[in-house]
Image (cartoon, rainbow, N blue to C red):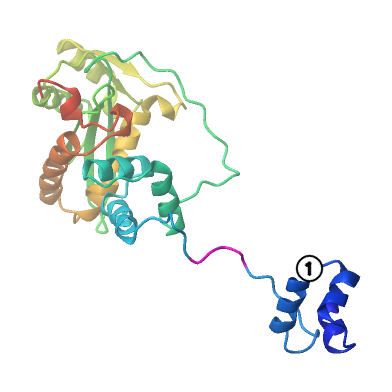
Amino acid sequence: MEAVRLVKYRGWSTRQVARYTGFNQSAIVKWCKKDPTGGWQRIETKSSKPHHHPKALPRAIVEAIVTQRLTHRRCSEVVHQELINQGVLVSLSSVKRTIARVGLIKKRSPWKRPHDFTPRPEVTHSGALIQVDTIHLVGPDGLRIYIYTLIDLFSRWAYAEVAERIGAKPSVGFIRRAQKASSFRFELVQTDHGSEFSTWFTHGVQRMGMMHRHSRVRQSNDNAHVERFNRTIQEECLDRVPHVLAKYRVAIINYLRYYNTERLHMGINFKTPAQVIPSY
């Protein structure tokens, strides 16, 4: 503002003002063009960011990234791998930047403390460790529906069923049907301390030749895999189905087929459970 005043009110030349203020003459010329008031308003500094970049992603690739993100709501790594499978060549960093730029990512709070991971039995093959849990759903009319969930930590193979009630006996029946549906033998079943996984349940799985292990008290990460599967099946399947028992049964059957044979999993190197289990 002072440089513009010297030019327009005192009649100094731009070269003289440049020597007096120490700024470049071309900058002073630009300031004089931007300020029609003659040095009585603030001259905003515009961004030097270019409008176009020769290495910018083509619009078709950006649309493919956004479409893939909105279709399955998966993370950047999975979106990147799915695009590669479709023949779209793009780097992982470009996928992450694009998803963040269009506002399709939920950033973590810098104030949230990270939780420590708890140790678990070593998993070297399918069936070495099976985690089991239940989901409780309550409809607007107060109707309660329960979902039994099961996941194998090695292959990420999952199984689920709808139940009108839960208890030790229905839980044993669920394990028996899940074992029949799988192509590998369950060796160790891990659950929380719910009443449906009581001592009677332990005796029931032992009669089937399996061992039962309870997760540690107040250590939710012991059952992290099945808890994550509970969230996945709710977001990708159950939340889209009316609160009707029969509809849940049909939807879960179709979703398990997709989950075990088509859905890519980061934990098994972007493969499907069917690819990890040769005899599936």
Residue under pointer 1: 24
Q: Which residue is drawn at 12% across and 24% down?
A: 182
Q: Where is residue 33 drawn, in percent x and y?
A: 70, 83
- Whether residue 48 is in magenta: the answer is yes
Front one among 69 and 107: 69
Q: Where is residue 240 drawn, in percent x and y?
A: 22, 55
Front one among 264 and 89: 89
Residue 228 to residue 58: above or below: above
Q: For the N terminus, give its image quadrant.
A: bottom right
Q: Where is residue 267 drawn, in percent x and y?
A: 32, 29
Residue 163 seen in the current view: no
| Main SS category, magenta section | loop
Q: Residue at x 45, y 53 (%)?
A: 100
Q: Magenta span covers which residues?
A: 47-51
Q: Where is residue 226 drawn, in percent x and y?
A: 31, 31
Front one among 64 and 257: 64
- Whether residue 50 is in magenta: the answer is yes
